[in-house]
Amino acid sequence: MPKITFIQPDGAEQTVEVVAGWSVMEGAVRSLVPGIDADCGGACACATCHVYVDPAWLAALPAKSEMEETMLDFAQTAAPNSRLSCQLRVTSDLDGLIVRVPIAQH
């Protein structure tokens, strides 16, 4: 299974194995990663699964959809490398992905 590393605002790291085909958000929620609230359950209807993708991984990800761009407008601290983890489908190519969790989701 691909491994995803979540880095908390305080620098604490948590690496979890995520089933290929799940979203990064599903892996985080099922692994109890703090800070990934996922209030809408992955419907791309909120921004509470917002993460910052490590710059080294940005080129490996699909482009943001228009809906994701719109929802990121609701993220308090969006940045150019911001993504909604519910929109990132895990594949073997993402083994080793590193994302940072924002200080707050609401």
Image (spheres, rainbow, N blue to C red):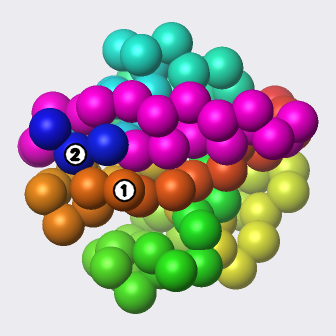
Whole-percent x, y for residue 74 in the image? 74, 52
Residue 82 x %, y %: 64, 65
Looking at the rendered structure, the secondary structure element under dot 1 is loop
Q: Which residue is mark 1?
A: 96
Please, what is the three-letter code of the amino acid marked with disc 1? Gly
Frontmost residue, 69 versus 27: 27
Q: Quadrant of the C terminus?
A: top right
Please provide percent x and percent y for residue 60: 33, 79
Q: Measured from the top left, where is residue 86 in percent x and y?
A: 39, 43
Decide which of 66, 12 is in the foreground and name it. Answer: 12
Residue that numbered label 2 is attached to:
2
Q: Is residue 19 above or below residue 33?
A: below
Q: Nearer the viewer, residue 14 or 61?
A: 14
Does residue 17 appear to the left or right of 92 in the view shown? right
Are dots 1 and 2 in contact, CB under 8 Å?
A: yes
Q: What's the CA distance linking mark 1 and mark 2?
A: 7 Å
Say left or right for 78 vs 59.
right
What's drawn in magenta, residue-wise? 4-21
Q: Residue at x 45, y 75 (%)?
A: 57
Q: Earlier in the sequence, mark 1 or mark 2?
A: 2
Q: Secondary structure beneath disc 2?
A: loop
**Outermost residue, bottom direction?**
59
